[in-house]
Image: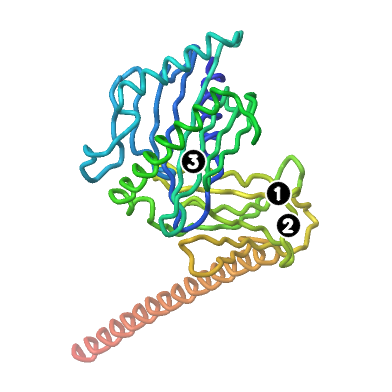
Amino acid sequence: MRNENKMTKLFIFLWVLSFPTSASTGSHSAWVLVTYIKGNTQFPEFSITVMLDDITVGYYDSETRTYVTRGNTTNEDDMYNLGDNTAIRELLYDHLVDKLRSENHTNNLVVYQILGLCELLDKDKSGPFIIKNAFSGSTTDELKYFDGKFTYNGPLKYTEQESDPALQLLMWYHEVFSYPNCLNTLRSYLKKRGAQVKRKVKPRVRLIKKANSDSRGFRVSCLATGFYPRHINLTLFRDEQPVADHEITGGDLLPNDDGTYQMRKSLEISAADKHTYTCSATHLSLDNKLDIDLEYQGETFKQVISSVLVVLALGLVLITVIGVIKWRRRRHSASSTSDYSSASTTEDSVDKT
């Protein structure tokens, strides 16, 4: 059951994170994710998550039965939140429960999700409105509205000449009510939380070479972390030429605990590989492309070792010189004392005579 819980959390996160959005600097989106889980898991049976871009601004679940705003620094009592609307919550819950009853699933764990979003493009231009339904992390149907036109992918009949009556009603409702309300909510959130989603944090990038005991070769990894917003281009180069995608592993975007992101791309090479590897990163926070050289590669590593040995040798020589000087001073001091004692004894003898 522990594995099922981990998998549930994983596909919920990946399905949301992998949803395509514009990478434009001036575009922003409002999201609503509704999740219904049937089975023994650590998660609530029913939950609603409201997001501005990739920041959670509100959350409701069936265990607390309370809508909670998150991350706000200003009063948002005047904001309309779908998750805080009892009537809509009940309608969504009943819809998902009825859907489960109508479909005979034998799995111990069943997850249904509804994802809705709208987007504002550059210069406040109205962007696409999208509704997606998913079962266990896989999309079952999708409805998109943009520039006055609908597109639909799913089991219901839809063509330009003819479409399912239920689908026609749904399209009318989204065009007249859902889409305008979503855009208005998005604009209101941007006024209150614009500083959060418009911030820019530079990535920390490293290119590392580590031994791989399995292949007896090496793994070259380019890691970028701590950046925001999440869109980043990370490229591995071999002798100043981009490495082919099929040779690279990784490349997934992952969240950090502080709200920033990280990405890692890796390449397996042989022990005899003599190529020169570099990594480049482009990000909205960077004025220019960031080029990173490989750390501790080949001769560079030997040079580092040699430098350390030279420093240690010089240190030993210095310690030896200091020791010799101190020894000579002590010897000279002892000799002076001995000469003084001898002279004093001689003078005393002369006086007695």
Tell me the residue at 30%/26% (across/down): 85
Q: Position of residue 72 (x, y in %)?
A: 27, 42
The type of residue carrying mark 2 is Val
Determine which of the numbered discs, if any, sits on residue 243 in the image: 2
Query: Spatial distance from mark 1 to mark 2, Cα to Cα?
Result: 7 Å
Query: Spatial distance from mark 1 to mark 3, Cα to Cα?
Result: 34 Å
Q: Position of residue 97 (x, y in %)?
A: 47, 13
Asked whether 276 or 279 is in front, the reply is 279
Q: Nearer the viewer, mark 1 or mark 3?
A: 3
Element at label 1: strand
Q: Which residue is mark 1?
A: 248
Q: Position of residue 139 (x, y in %)?
A: 60, 29
Asked whether 218 or 341 is in front, the reply is 218
The type of residue carrying mark 1 is Ile
| Drawn side of residue 321 relative to residue 55, left or right | right
The type of residue carrying mark 3 is Phe
Q: Residues within 10 Å of mark 3 (few under 14, many from 20)?
A: many
Choose top left, top right, bottom left or bottom right for residue 67: top left
Q: Which residue is mark 3?
A: 129
Q: Is residue 228 visible?
A: no
Tell me, yes or no, whether the two marked residues, 1 and 2, touch with CB atoms within 8 Å.
Answer: yes
Tell me the residue at 65%/26% (across/down): 157
Asked whether 61 or 268 is in front, the reply is 61
